[in-house]
Image (cartoon, rainbow, N blue to C red):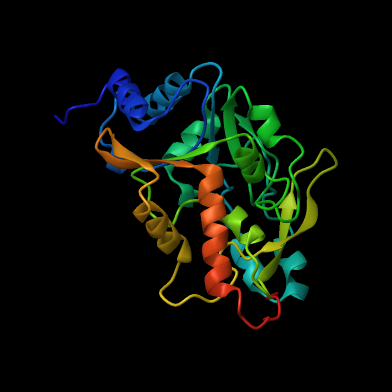
Amino acid sequence: MPHHASIHALVADLVSLGVATGDLVMVHASLRRLGPVERGAEGVIEALDQAVGPGGTVMMVLGARDDWAWVNDRPEADRAALLEGSPPFDALTTPASPEVGVLAEVFRRTPGTRVSDHPEGRFGARGLLDRHLLLDVPWNDYYGPGSPLERLVDAGGKVLRLGADPDTVTLMHYAEYLAEVPGKRRVRRYRLVATPRGPELRLVECLDDNNGIVDYPGGDYFADILQAYLEQGTARRGRVGQADSELLDARDLVEFAARWMTKRFGGREATPPAG
């Protein structure tokens, strides 16, 4: 049988990486890369809670499972009819997006986790700042000014990466709003949302957080930005469980990412927004 890392050992690893009592951390984690842990995903969340302590806060991006996302690839005039009768988004019951990993869904269901009410940019948080981070979030441009991501930066938060893929730093979407780039690609999405009056069709407008604000050769520029940031040597790096991990200052990372995008994309000709 494989050796299971204890919750106590995981807390020690987090502290060695630099996680401190009272910290606000936004977590991206791969359970597979962390390796076997006592009590599995629940044990990882317990270790995170212990590492930041009662005065700290743990935050994750949740997104929302959406089996009808394909509708927003169809002509805009057809979308409302196509969504008719589909299950509406419910902030309290809709599962996290499978793309963000198993831990996010366990985090969402863990007693004490607060969840923001948004079908696209949904976050979960637990701890001292959970209300501050998640209440009254913007409907449009939900990763931009006023968003939980901006609130994370303003509160002196950190990004904790536990074996996560390099293109999964959600905070960089906030940097896309700050970067000085002409003609950033925008999208309009239709979502069916549960309300006390029954399902309502709503329109969400935002920068294109699926395909990027510009066309970029080689795929996802987030991974390239993270690599360039880590090469500076300012991040704390170490192992948590079996995972190569990093602890990054949120404000420093956002400012670096915005400068990177401005430098590379800032001289572009404007392109019309996508439908």
Say above or below: 81 vs 248.
Answer: below
Residue 154 in the image: state x and y as whole percent.
65, 39
> For this view, does 224 lie left or right of residue 122?
left
Residue furthest top as drawn: 54
Specify the quadrant of the image occupied by residue 102: top left
As displayed, is residue 87 above or below residue 220?
above
The residue at the point 32 percent across, 27 percent down is: 16
Q: Nearer the viewer, residue 274 or 86?
A: 274
Residue 36 versus residue 86: which sits nearer the camera?
A: 36
Q: Residue at x 22, y 26 (%)?
A: 4
Q: Looking at the figure, which quarter contains the N terminus? A: top left
Describe residue 35's horizontal placement relative to residue 142 as left or right: left
Picture coordinates of residue 162, whole percent (x, y) = 36, 40
User: In this rendering, does residue 43 appear at all?
Assistant: yes
Q: Is residue 170 visible?
A: no
Query: Outermost residue toward the right?
Result: 197
Q: From the top left corner, tell me how far across and down residue 65 is, in percent.
A: 56, 49
**Which residue appears farthest toward the bottom when viewing the image?**
269
Q: How many marks?
A: 0
**Location of residue 173 in the rendering, given as x and y in whole percent from the top left corner:** 58, 56
Tell me the residue at 43%/45% (across/down).
Answer: 101
| Up/down of 185 relative to 161, above or below | below
- In this image, 53 relative to 137: left or right? left
Q: Nearer the viewer, residue 64 or 60?
A: 60
Question: Where the C terminus falls, by quadrant?
Answer: bottom right
